[in-house]
Image (cartoon, grey):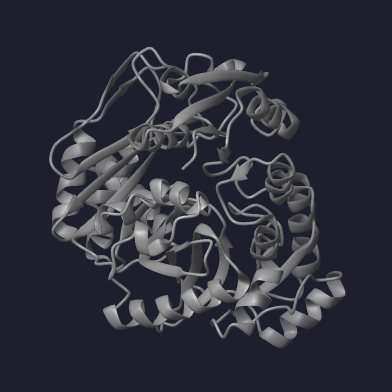
Amino acid sequence: MFHKILIANRGEIALRVISACKEMGIRTVAVYSEADRHSLHVKFADEAICIGPPRAAESYLNVPAVISAAEIADVDAIHPGYGLLSENANFAEVCRASNIKFIGPPPEVTRLMGEKSTARQTMKKARVPILPGSDGILADESEALDCACSIGYPVILKAAAGGGGRGMRIVRSADELPALFQQASSEAAGAFGNGDLYMEKYIERPRHIEFQVLADEHGNVLSLGERECSIQRRHQKLIEEAPSLAITPRLRAELGKTIERCMKDVGYRNAGTVEFLMDEDGKLYFIEMNTRIQVEHTITEMVTGIDLVKAQIRIAAGERLSEIVPTPVTITGHAIECRINAEHPEKFTPSAGTITAFSLPGGNGVRVDTAQYAEGVVPPYYDSLIAKLVCHGHNREEAINKMQRALSQFVVQGIYTSIPLHQRIFDDPEFRSGHFDTHFMERFFTRQGEKAEAEAKA
């Protein structure tokens, strides 16, 4: 087992990894920017090293600075968390060259599955269903027009190296394709340094379903079931739950076996998530893979009882899945996660500042992953996520009721948060029914507007 691990991240995920390491008797090293000097991940790590100014490009994304810190601290391994350098194959390669274990897949696999058009072709060869689309990168607008004509409108242009909705445009006719192609390519180039695009058939009302996998370094792969991630705003997830009401036990088992076979074929290692869209007829199509731990890994932990971060570390240390995960994996109850963001709940503008009061809900089946505290500062330089509220119940209704109670007892003062928005969502009849899709939030905001207008007239 590792003696010391550096966490190349910040915020709640850095603290989450530190907590796992402490329980395993592993020493930890935190890296931090000048803006995070007083953060909890710095306080609770065994050692902490400042690696640069506040902006991520000069600190958390600065590979030489991170590697230098790892060498100074003499660590055995680096855990990248999610975001930042977690899916950076070059960083994983530098770790390998520096004789530091990267807790994640090999860089070759990260490149293979991280480049979306390549991942599509890989999954297609493995007989995993994919959406009709381009065979690879679109050379130019002319090829995009030919491809769209072949597939049939509407189609969606996507950044080959992207994520989070950037470099993405829905195209409903040939007339609008050239302009949208240029917009998507420019946005992708600015966000990811790569303007390459590919194309897929656009599903009007899809559900977003993802499967969690673990793979050891001995060729063993295990699917841990699915998560429902359809409640999104601008392609950013707000609420996730497990299991999905749309997945039957038979489909879960069949697709799980297909995913396991595919991951073996590509030589996958460590934790990863395979993402699908489900169409109106219940058919699933592969869209992408995330080669890291997910923000929403918590709900899989709640329904399976498996600590995914500890599993990542044990896999990287060479242990077999049979030593880590009890089989068969059973799904017990229902879990829901709310991403609590530091932003205005109606304007959706970031809300940086000092937290003047901070009180967390508790009780049976209630979990909060956070690195914030009273008098803590939310800096303006990073992602707005400040906490993850997770509730587990015997069934979905109990989990929802528990979440409503927990949200009402979650106190954050001094900044705006998304808590009021989450409370309104959990009161919404469509959400409670479970019959929704990725366009739920658009309909929800329409209903909220109509309700406010009616109340104003009354």
Q: Is residue 457 visible?
A: no
Q: In front: 449, or 83?
A: 83
For residue 221, above or below residue 97 = below
Q: Where is residue 411 in the image (x, y as percent from the top left)?
A: 26, 25
Query: Residue at the location (50% across, 66% down)?
Result: 275
Q: In front: 320, or 78?
A: 320
Q: Is residue 450 visible?
A: yes
Q: Where is residue 106 in the image (x, y as percent from the top left)?
A: 64, 56
Query: Residue at the location (41% across, 16% down)?
Result: 376
Q: Where is residue 418 in the image (x, y as percent from the top left)?
A: 37, 36
For residue 336, above or below residue 198 = above
Q: In front: 249, or 397?
A: 249
Query: Residue at the location (34% across, 13% down)?
Result: 356
Query: Residue at the location (17% across, 45% down)?
Result: 365
**Number of numbered callouts drawn:** 0
Q: Relative to 161, is 397 on the left or the right?
A: left
Q: Where is residue 346 in the image (x, y as percent from the top left)?
A: 42, 37
Q: In which quarter of the image is the C terminus?
A: top left
For residue 286, above or below residue 393 = below
Q: Relative to 158, is 229 on the left or the right?
A: left
To which quarter of the image does residue 149 belong?
bottom right
Q: In front: 241, or 342?
A: 241
To which quarter of the image does residue 123 belong?
bottom right
